Amino acid sequence: MLCRAACSTSRKLVPALGALGSRRKHSLPDLPYDYGALEPHINAQIMQLHHSKHHAAYVNNLNIAEEKYREALEKGDVTAQVALQPAIKFNGGGHINHSIFWTNLSPNGGGEPEGELLEAIKCDFGSFKNFKEKLTAVSVGVQGSGWGWLGFNKEQGRLQIAACSNQDPLQGTTGLIPLLGIDVWEHAYYLQYKNVRPDYLKAIWNVISWENVTARYMAGKK
Amino acid sequence: MQLHHSKHHAAYVNNLNIAEEKYREALEKGDVTAQVALQPAIKFNGGGHINHSIFWTNLSPNGGGEPEGELLEAIKCDFGSFKNFKEKLTAVSVGVQGSGWGWLGFNKEQGRLQIAACSNQDPLQGTTGLIPLLGIDVWEHAYYLQYKNVRPDYLKAIWNVISWENVTARYMAGKK
């Protein structure tokens, strides 16, 4: 179950149709824990809607957009391809981001990182406390919908904090390797925290899986 | 409504006042860098204040139904029918990706009505030149507690509380 959840997209092969060859569709990854597992920090109602409605919609709409894109490619229709870009970016980004997010969270999460990741955090941010404050501030400060990210800049060999708008995927838009994402779309917290995004940020640190963030860091460094 | 007005809109007002104060200081010093750095805060909070101030007047417990007179004629002229217009504004509002607003605006230069979408709190007139007549807030905070992820249900419902009196008044003022 952990392996399935750690994969960024799980794909099922669908039998070939006509000349287009085999189609691989994206599918909604299972949540690695029950909807209520992150309570009291993130409640079950939010987790259920977030996973089974919002993320599911990104997956469905991504598959639809990719299908249309395949047809446009087939016809060499550049105009249609360009017109489909926002849908691919939005739904594809939504699928990528949430697939990472579910694994970043855990009912056994919280506390602080250790080992190499902690050393890197101290190196690039001064201390874990500084890093936490910085990522919190960036996440709280997102205007509108978006995400706060801890990313790894492979070229420069350092950790970086970044914010992305809407569902813009971190790696696709900035080149940073995503390690830890904080979803600050209102649907991620409103039912429980209402307009008080800072309270959601305070709470979410209790369910961060440093094991997962570390695994992403180690994989990114290779 | 209570959270939307007393928390969200209030925060835009407070933060706009703070940003304008800082901007005044930057102007005083001729500090262009600081002015540019303050632009997002002015646009976001200023836009939020403008947009919501319009929004509260666009809605009414006595709202709903259809417009009449000159506004209805203009809608028929520019969209074919009220039904077409309603479907178009609904689709544009539902289709906003992320946070933003759907708008019925008046293009004074061309003398016609237009539907537009804006991201985040970008104010319609400041960013497009269109005169705002009717705004539909599609930030999740505008509907999530009641409609959850089903934005289309919120759109279906909101037509029941649109004050055509107010939208007409804005149209008539815009035409002058």
Image (tube, coloured by chain):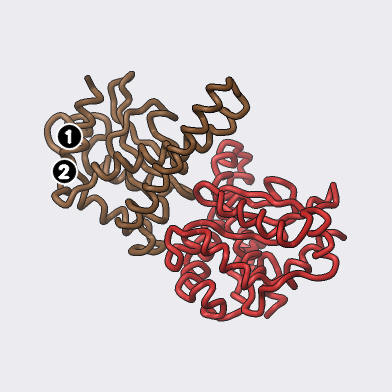
Chain colours: A red, B brown
Q: Amino acid at mark 2?
A: Glu
Q: Is residue B11 left or right of residue A184?
A: left
Q: Is residue A17 left or right of residue A185?
A: right
Q: Can you tell which mark lies on residue B94?
A: none
Q: Marks 2 and 1, Cα distance to the nearest angstrom? A: 8 Å
Which amino acid does the dot numbered 1 rest on?
Answer: Leu
Q: Nearer the viewer, residue B92 or A81?
A: B92
**Which residue is at a point 22% across and 19% down the rendered structure image?**
B176
What chain does badge 2 belong to?
A: B
Q: Image quadrant of residue B17? A: top left
* Label drawn at residue B72: 1
Q: Quadrant of residue A72?
A: top right
**Residue contact at pointers 2 and 1, CB within 8 angstroms:** yes
The image position of residue A32, as x and y in percent, is: 63, 77
Chain-order first, disc 2 or disc 1: 2
Can residue A12 be seen here? The reply is no
The quarter of the picture where the C terminus of chain A appears is bottom right
The residue at the point 57 percent across, 59 percent down is A183
Locate residue B53, reporting x and y percent.
31, 40
Is residue B175 or residue A205 the one in the foreground?
A: A205
Residue under label 2: B66
Q: Secondary structure at mark 1?
A: helix
Q: Regarding mark 2 in the picture, which secondary structure is present there? A: loop
Answer with left or right where residue B75 lies relative to residue B39: left
**Residue drawn at 61 percent across, 53 percent down:** A137
The relative height of residue A46 versus residue B83 in the rendered view (above or below) is: below
Q: Residue at x 21, y 33 (%)?
A: B76
Quarter of the figure that contains the N terminus of chain A: bottom right
